Amino acid sequence: MPHHAGHDMEACIEACLDCHKSCLATVAHCLSLGGHHAEPKHIRIMLDCAQICAVSADFMIRGSDHHAHLCRECADICRDCERSCAGHTGADETMRACAEACRRCAEECAKMAA
């Protein structure tokens, strides 16, 4: 089992899966709103974040020795996504919830990458 086995890894996996789900739901939400909510750069960072969160969770679940550097990258992308959602003009409750999921995931992944 990886060196961060147990509760810490389970918390990180849970945060990654929650962030993955939140980002995908927020992409759908933003696309339905259209206009500036559907700007390509904003949609792209949410899709990037959802993908890296899913991959990071997969690596931790199967005990890959490579999970730490993926978690490091995941934390960076989650921070970018958090800024995009929280700082977006017209950020609503869904976007703020996504930003919060990204913040939690970035914190957990940073711990795993340490």
Image (cartoon, grey):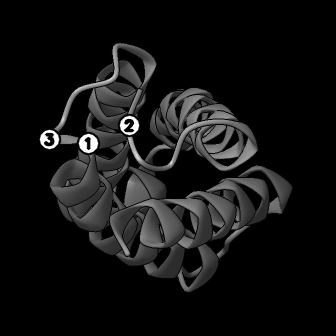
Residues marked 3 and 1 touching at CB (< 8 Å) = yes
Quarter in which the N terminus is drawn:
top left
Residue type at tag 1: His
Q: Disc 2 vs disc 3: which is toward the camera?
A: 2
In the rendered image, residue 26, in percent from the top left (x then y), is placed at 58, 40
Alpha carbon distance from label 2 to label 1: 9 Å
Instruction: Report the front residue among 59 and 15.
Output: 59
Who is closer to the viewer here, 96 or 37? 96
Dot 2, how many residues are within 10 Å of its Cα: few (below 14), some (14-19), or many (20+)?
some
Q: Residue 66 bears which disc, if any? A: 3
Kind of element beneath mark 2: loop
Q: Nearer the viewer, mark 2 or mark 1?
A: 2
Query: Which residue lies at the image location 41% right of the left edge and 66% below the top edge?
Result: 81
Could you tell whether 49 is left or right of 14 in the image?
Answer: left
Locate residue 80 relative to residue 61 in the image: left or right: left
According to the picture, the residue beneath numbered tag 1 turns out to be 67
Q: Is residue 78 above or below residue 7?
A: below
Q: Mark 2 and mark 3: span between their CA atoms?
A: 10 Å
Q: Where is mark 2, residue-wise?
A: 2
Mark earlier in primary sequence (2, 1): 2
